[in-house]
Image (spheres, helix red, strand yellow):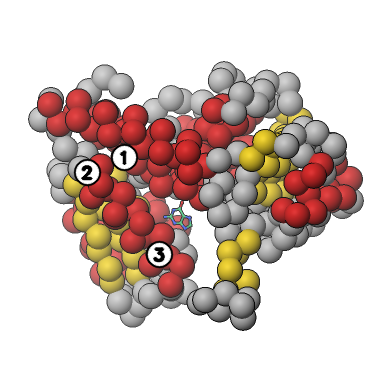
Amino acid sequence: MTLIDGKTVSRKVLEECRADIAAMKAQGVVPGLAVVIVGDNPASQAYVGSKVRTCADLGLFSRHIALPAATSQDDLLAVVADLNADPAVHGILVQSPPPPHIDEAAVVRAIRPDKDVDGFHPENVARLALEDPAAFVPCTPLGCQRLLIEYGIETAGARVVIVGRSMIVGKPLALLLMARGKGGDATVTVAHSRTRNLPAVCRDADILIAAIGRPEFVTADFVKDGAVVIDVGINRVTDPSAKNGYRIVGDVNFADVSPRCAAITPVPGGVGPMTIAMLISNTLKAARLQHGLAS
Ligand code: GUN
């Protein structure tokens, strides 16, 4: 069984980004990312903190905008409008989920599509479906695809089952893996909470991807012998023996599933670290597109 090591692959991607950033700076362009967070969700604060630290480490320009939970929709839209107009900012990310009074879809639509490094804007969703290379593709799906490529796991002709149909992971990942070309050409099934006979559907998969947000939901009876399992889940479960009272588990019951697999991602240390690496990579793509630089 191969453990798919997202920390090592993410470091490789970030080192490639570091070299690209140096080359862009030599051409007078400093790539910039703005990260906006509304409210004080501790998991979101942790993600945003690590995004901002990664930017600093790589020499990217970053703006971290932390707004109070009571921020109005109009005030948030005004911040987005400011960032749309700021030439030092090439990529904009508004951390999800925002507080319930915020209309997230409207905020996403307000982001300039060529600064939408999350790939959530309808224009980028359409571009991904159209297999347009200028599409911004959501970072977590890109990270999953990159792990498969780096580990030489063939997707062409493979049966992929994705459990979860979110706009952040399941749907864009399905589009990405069925697109033509490297890391694509798969036969993709998207399953979800209403799927009949879910374990049997999953057992058909050569590559099983769990992105449902339910701790340790996928057990050995979901997995064909020799399958590759990608666990996108990041769930906090209470654990009185842990020092902060919780631990992080995936959507896959690792101990149960791993003996069956040809390869599997651990949680933490699998898909998680890839998301930030692909965010930086998307930010460089945005800066190149906005400045007409070759990739
Ligand atoms: N929350 C969890 N994942 C993501 C992501 O990829 N982008 C944003 N903006 N928020 C998230």
Q: Which residue is mark 2?
A: 60
Q: Which residue is mark 3?
A: 46
> Which of marks 2 and 3 precedes in the sequence?
3
> Which of marks 2 and 1 precedes in the sequence?
2
Q: Contact, CB < 8 Å: mark 1 with mark 2?
A: yes
At label 2, counting other C-alpha atoms closer than 10 Å, the crowd grade (few under 14, some 14-19, many 20 or more) is many
Q: Quadrant of ligand 1?
A: bottom left
**Which is nearer the eye, 176 or 149?**
149
- Name which residue type carries label 1: Thr
Residue 119 lies, in percent from the top left, at 43, 43
**Mark number, residue 283:** 1
**Which is nearer the eye, 141 or 228?**
228
The quadrant in which the N terminus is found is: top right
The quadrant in which the C terminus is found is: top left
For discs 1 and 2, the disc positioned in front in the rendered view: 2
- Which residue is found at the position 46% from the left and 67% from the top? 43
Circle 2 SS class: loop
Mark 1 to mark 2 CA distance (whole Å): 9 Å
Position of 52 with respect to 182 (left or right) is: left
